[in-house]
Amino acid sequence: MKICIIGTGYVGLVSGVCFSDLGNDVICVDTNVNKIEDLKKGLIPIYEPGLEELVKKNYKAGRLNFTTDLSNAVKNSNIIFICVGTPTKKKSYSADLRQIYKAVNNLRKYINSFKVIVTKSTVPVTTGDKIESLISKKKSKKMFSVVSNPEFLREGEAIRDFMFPDRIIVGTDNTRAKNLLKNLYDPLIKRGRKYLITSRRGAELIKYASNAFLATKISYINEISNLCEKVGVDIEDISIGMGLDQRIGSRFLRPGPGYGGSCFPKDTRAIIDTAKKFNTNLSIIASTIKSNNDRYNILFSKIKKIMKGKIAKKKITFLGVTFKPNTDDMRESPALKLIPKLNKIGAKISYYDPSGSKSILEKYKNVSFANKISSACVHSDLIIIHTEWNEFKNLNFKRLVKTSKFSIYDMRNIYSQKKMKNSGIKYFKI
């Protein structure tokens, strides 16, 4: 199969590489010349385990190519995937679809034979209808079919999620498009992956409904953890006990600093915006957004309580600042709420993250990146375990801090409270 991928961001690059690894000829298109040249050299713009090796392997084999030439890529492909960003508009809950429509307006000029045009970007329901209307102004509907095929890739687990997905969702009623997409995904279907054909609008909404539900589970368990702290119950017991019910399941029932990243925040907002346009009340999802926003204030209050109100001039260390491990993604990370608030009242912030320093934090005075865990922790008054990277799971804090007067606030409940107490460490968890 000959495939064109428009956009070499997280979704586009992972999808293109994995499709090529399944034996397809893939051309990844981007307007960023420097990014395209770097990709040809095997330089990866994102942190994703295993991705660099697959890029180099398939580029060398000739199945994967990178270009800025959209015309040639579209003309020589059977299937065109749109994989551009759909962030939240400023001062709004709406999804910003400018990149989607820009890609559509550009690609429609180069349709020279029947093309399946697939939105893999997360887009609000009815976006496919609008794309079809735009293209049909220039091309006959016999020349193309617009399909929704949402991605369900977790950052840090993206390659595995692509190759071994829980389900593959394809939204179309076009027979020719159905056959092409079925053939494309056949290697995964043969591995026993579930393949669902639905309407285009149905596929668009499945993605939003799924992410909103998972975000709700996270906010729900965090709210239960607030109650647990009031009544003296271990939230871990509650999570395990609930998760054993197969109707509920254990995934996304782990308490923490709140959800972040490139998907849950923008997708919960976007589905609320869509519901308003169709005069529908999604009160549960609206409450989820509010609960997650309130989470930062609860954590901040807990930090002040641990420090007995004395934060100014104290050294506070963040272990991890990304919203989750195995990614360098800082988008809507809880750390971006907590660090500025602590910095504003005079704390000296040191942070270490395995994915490197973060330019977004450089604008704050007294916030510094340490290139080693030991450098970040030494002489700290408070260590906050913010992100659950594996290298944070077995640390000797007394040796790292080199002082007896320090506290640990474990926002991921990595460590045993009993063992910490026996070690004489002031340890606080969710």
Image (cartoon, rainbow, N blue to C red):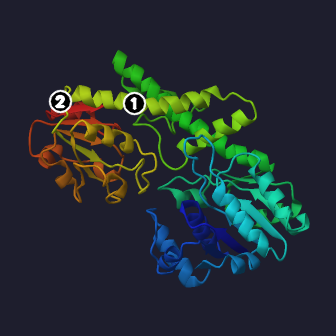
> Residue 168: x percent and y percent?
69, 54
Instruction: Find the residue positioned furthest to the top.
Output: 231
The reply, left or right, for residue 150 in relation to residue 289 is right
Secondary structure under badge 1? helix
> Residue 204: x percent and y percent?
72, 48
> Residue 103: x percent and y percent?
68, 65
Residue toward you, 162 or 191: 162
Residue at 67% in and 53% down: 150
Mark 2 or mark 1, whichever is nearer to me: 2
Residue at 85% in and 67% down: 138
Secondary structure under badge 2? loop
Label 2 sits on residue: 310
Residue at 68% in and 63% down: 102
Amino acid bearing label 1: Glu
Label 1 sits on residue: 236
Instruction: Find the residue positioned furthest to the left.
Output: 403
> Residue 180: x percent and y percent?
80, 66
Amino acid bearing label 2: Lys
Residue density around tag 2, few if under 14, some if 14–19, many if 20 or more, within 10 Å: some
